Image (spheres, rainbow, N blue to C red):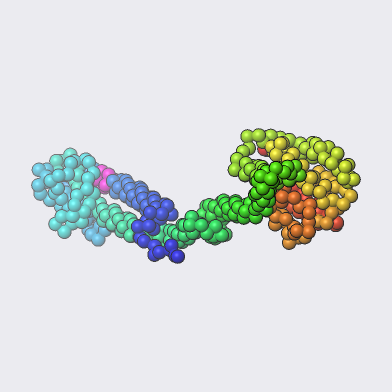
Amino acid sequence: MSYRSRLRLREVQATSAFRLTLVLGSLFAAAMVIMAVVIYTATAQQLIVRSEGMLQRESLRLLNAPSHRVEQDVKEEVARNAKGLDHFGLISADGLTRLAGDIGPYANVVLDHPSDVPDLDGQAAMRVLASRRGDGRIVVVGRDISERRYLLTVVLEVIVGALAIILPGALLIGALISRPSLRRIRDLQSACRRIAVGELDVRMPVAGRGDELDQVAITINDMVGDLERVVSQVKNVTDAIAHDLRTPLTRVKSHLLDYHDRARDGELAEDQVAQLSHDLDLVLERFAALLRIAEIEASARTSRFAEVDLGELVATAAMLHAPVAEDNGIGLTAQVSSHAPALADPQLMLEALSNLIDNALKFAGTAVSVLVTEDGDRILISVSDDGPGIPAAERDAVLQRFYRRGEQDERSGMGLGLSIVSAILHLHKFQLVLEDAHPGLCATIIAHKITHSED
């Protein structure tokens, strides 16, 4: 069943990548507009200052010109700047008649205050300065402001052009960036839905980029892996319970039927009572071991974790098993090379070490050795025996509950000892490695040495 479908525009628009790209594009466009306005304002202000400087100089010169020369001076200036930017005018004292020059009169111009006048009667827009002479006539000096108008036009064109490119570009880039991420999220959703319906072998796709989606996928994959392991163990336990308890329960039922017949005949069978009790003890022992594993795996408690010396726990476990080893004629030695501090539950770790030593004593020929060493920030606890060992193909299987290595092996017990060890080490995030001891088996616990940063 496929959960993928075509990407919709509204889904692309809703992605964080698209929105972030749009925000960045808008900020970039706003920055360009502000920069263009600042450049225009600074340049226009500079042009105004230069124009007013010229207006002041020329106006002052004409104001100081003799009365009989001012009209001629205006005409000469107009002739000199016939195709230029500067313009001049001499207006009558009532301000209504142009006496000489090419500009004026202006009705709304205030004397001695530079101001802009629009284009009028074929004259370009100008900045003008009108001043009254001592003889009453008015001198008008003007400066073409077409350059400033042209600059404003160019700036507006640049702003409009930039916005026309940036905003659609931001939309396009946002869509291009969002689509691959949205497709990956669709793949993750598809994988989640398959996992939700029970396909625990499915894993989240990891692109290998190390981005946030990869980190989420790796975390979920680890979680699903643990879930798959637990579900598989539950299934194996169910199968094992059905297989292992069938024989003793069948025997109990058979004995009860036999007792019923003997009781009716008045006979007493003490040996069969003892056998019945033994069979029930086996059943209770199996249930107790299963409950112990379930308690360890389900609680996941760390409240009892503390800094403990694993070397001291090894010495304690070896001391507890020394009488058993002596009774079986097996030499048990424990060697701790250095202080081995780790963050652990001391009771659980002592139980794990005891199970490993007990298992080694069960299969050893003549000797069992326990060795504690350090490898960088790791603590290695090795329990070795000189027994038959375990073939490499079965080393993972023996960690599963109720696994036994064939009917010929009478010492394999219930097949739960190593499962309890595995559950305890999994809670501590430690590792258990089974290797060939040449001869025999070497079971090594790899623990994390506590450091000052963990304090």
> Residue 347 lies in magenta, yes or no?
no
Observer-nearest residue: 139 or 387?
A: 387
Q: Is 168 above or below relative to 34?
A: below
Residue at 22 percent across and 41 percent down: it is: 113
Q: Position of residue 289 (x, y in %)?
A: 67, 44
Residue at 62 percent across and 41 percent down: it is: 295
Location of residue 335 by image quarter: top right
Picture quarter with the C terminus: top right
Q: Is 314 above or below relative to 245?
A: above
Picture quarter with the N terminus: bottom left
> Residue 56 lies in magenta, yes or no?
yes
Q: Position of residue 203 (x, y in %)?
A: 55, 59
Q: Is 62 positioned to the left or the right of 278 in the image?
A: left
Residue at 25 percent across and 52 percent down: it is: 143
Observer-nearest residue: 167 or 104?
A: 167
Secondary structure character of the magenta stretch overall:
helix
- Residue 65 seen by the camera: no
Location of residue 131 by image quarter: top left
Q: Is 267 positioned to the left or the right of 364 in the image?
A: left
Observer-nearest residue: 227 or 45?
A: 227
Q: Is 226 positioned to the left or the right of 405 in the image?
A: left
Q: Position of residue 100 (x, y in %)?
A: 15, 52
Q: Position of residue 147 (x, y in %)?
A: 29, 56
Which residues fall within the magenta stretch? 55-61
Residue at 89 percent across and 50 percent down: it is: 366
